[in-house]
Amino acid sequence: MFKEKLDKMKAREERRENKEAAKQRASRKSRDSRSPDQQAPEQIPVIPTMILKKNIPKPDKPMNTLQADDPMFQRLLMSINDKMEYTWDCIEVSYVTRRTAKYDKHREKLPVKKKIVPVEDGVIEDFFSERFEKRVNDLGDEMDLLNISQNEDGARTTVALSEKLEYLNSHTDLYTHPTSFILHNIMRHFIWNQQVPSVAIKSYQYINRIMFHFLGTAKENREEWLYLILTSIRDSTTNQRIDLESSPDIQSCYQFFSRVLQRATEDDHLSTRLMLSLVVNICQRDFEIWWKHHRQTKRQDDREISYPILFYLLNGKRDLQKHINESVLKLYEYTVNKDVQVSTDARKLVSMCAMLSAYRDMQENKAGLNTTGLKHDLAKKISNIFLKIADLTDNEMFMEISLLQPSWLSQQVSKLYLEEKKKLKVNSVTDVIKKSSELADSCDSNLILVLDNFLIKSFESLHIHSIARTLWHRQNSDSDYHVFTNTSKLKKDTNKQEKKTKVWKQTNDVKFSTATIISDINSMVGVINKDQVLPKAGVLKCLVFNMSAPDKF
C-alpha cells in the first residue's frame, strides 16, 4: 500500500515537471523563431493632452463657518461613531473587517445546548502513535512491520503525517476540537519545522478551519478559546493547562511568539512564512472578536476587563511597549529594509499593537492623540525606523508610511518624521494651509510626499469631508444628506452634556480635540466659497474639492 502511494506521488511529480519543461521549450522556440519583421513595433511616445481648466462658479448657497456650540456638529459626531460601531470601520487591521461567523444563532436544530469538548482520549493516542505498514516477502509471508513515521525517507514521513491529519480531521467538527497539545505538535512539527510544503499547507488549512469553527460559537466560550490557544502557543512541551496569572507561563508564550517573528527575519522558507501567517491570523481573528464583543467600553461597563491573545503573547502585563519594540517592530523594520513576502503580516501586527496601545491608554486616561502614552511612543519608534533607513526612495517611503494602519498612527508617524527630519512642525490641516504658500516653492520631494500623507490621513481620521459637506448641506436644507452613509440619518442629541465636551472620543478609543476639527473645517470655508485660492502645495488642492454645491463637483 505504501509503495503504491509513493509510486503515484513520484509519477505525479514527473508529469508536472515534464509539463513545465514543455511549456518552457515552446516559449523559447516561439521567441527564437520570430523574424525581424515580426518584432514588436517601436513604441511611439505619448504626447500628453492639454486639458483646459473649467471655471467652477461660486456656490449659490455658500458655506458658513462652523461654531463650537452648533448642535448639528455634535449630532454629526455621534452619527459617525454609530456608523463606525455598526460597520466596525475602526478595526483597521486589514482592508476588510470581516463579520463575525455565527452558526445556528436562533438554535433551531439543537433542542439542548451542546458543549464544545476536546477529542476523546482514544483519538489523542492514535494521533501520537507511530504509523506502521504491513510487509510481505516474495513468498507471501508476513514480515516485520515497517515504521513509516520515523523513517529517514522524507516522502514516507509525508504520507504518515498526512494520514494523521486526515484521521484528526475526521474526528473534529463544530463541537469537537483538538487538544492544546495536539495543536502545539501540529504547529511545531507539521508546519514550523516541516520541510515538505504539502504537509505544512494542509496543517495550516486545518488549524484555520478549526479556528473558524470555534470562533463561530457562543460568546461564553471565549475563556476556553484563550486557554486552548495560549496553551498551544508557548515555548514548553508540557501538557498542563496555562495559568493566565502565572508570569512564567505568560513569559513562555512571549518566548514562542518572539522566536516565530525572529525566525521570519532569518529564514524565508515556506514553512516559516506559514507559521508567521498562522500566528497573525489567530491574533487578528481573536482581536476582531474581542474588540466587538468583549472589550470594555463606555456603553458596556458591565463587561470585565479582558485582553486579546496578542496581549498575552506580548506579555503585556510586564512591559507591553518594550516587548512590542523587541519583537513586532524589529520584524517590521526588517520587512521595510528587505521588502519580503511577510511584510503584510508585519503591518497587521503593527496595526493590532497600535489599537491595543490605544485601549491601554484609554484605561489610563491618556486617550488624547497628542498626549504622552503608548500610542505616542509607538509612533515615535516607527518614525525612528524611517529616519534610520537610508535606502528607501521618496516614493517607497510614501508607500510604506501610507500603508500603516490605523490612519491616526500613519498621521502621527508622518508628523513626528517631519518634526525630526525636516524641522517642520504641523499639528493640523490648518497649519498646513497657513504654510502652503512657502511649501509650494519647495523642491524637497521627500518633504512633500510625507506631508501629503499627513494631510490624507488627517482628513481620513477626522472625517473632515463627511462633516464639512454635511454641515454645508444642512445649513441650507433640512433634508437628509445621502452622499455619505454615516450622515444620511443623523442621530438625535439626547445627552445634553455632550455639548460641553471639548474632545471627540471615537469608537477606536482615540480622542480628538473638537477645536482642531472646527479649525480645520473653517480653514477650508474660504476655498469652498471661491474667496481664496490655495497654492499648489502637494495634494492639498486635490483634497479641498472644487465644488459649487455639497453634492456637485
Image (tube, rainbow, N blue to C red):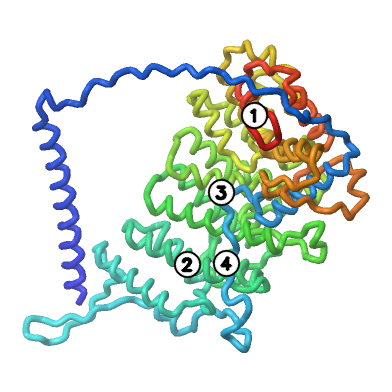
Q: Earlier in the sequence, mark 4 or mark 2?
A: 4
410 over 360 or under it: above or below: above
Q: Earlier in the sequence, mark 2 or mark 3?
A: 3
Task: Give the CA distance from mark 2 to mark 3.
Answer: 20 Å
**On the rendered structure, is 19 left or right of 463?**
left
Q: Earlier in the sequence, mark 3 or mark 4?
A: 3
Foreground mark, 3 or 1, reads 1
Task: Give the CA distance from mark 3 to mark 1.
Answer: 24 Å
Q: Which mark is residue 94?
A: 3
Residue beneath label 4, please? 101
- The answer to whether residue 379 is visible is no
Instruction: Give the residue type that dot 3 points to.
Output: Ser
Q: Earlier in the sequence, mark 1 or mark 2?
A: 2
Task: Give the CA distance from mark 4 to mark 2.
Answer: 12 Å
Residue beneath label 2, please? 209
The image shows residue 145 at horizontal and vertical percentages of 23, 80
> Tag 2, which secondary structure?
helix
Q: Nearer the viewer, residue 109 or 467?
A: 467
Quarter of the figure with residue 369: top right
Instruction: Give the residue type that dot 2 points to.
Output: Arg
**On the rendered structure, is 232 left or right of 321?**
left
Instruction: Give the residue type that dot 1 points to.
Output: Leu
Foreground mark, 4 or 2, reads 4
Residue beneath label 1, please? 543
Instruction: Give the residue type that dot 4 points to.
Output: Ala
**On the rendered structure, is 147 left or right of 230?**
left
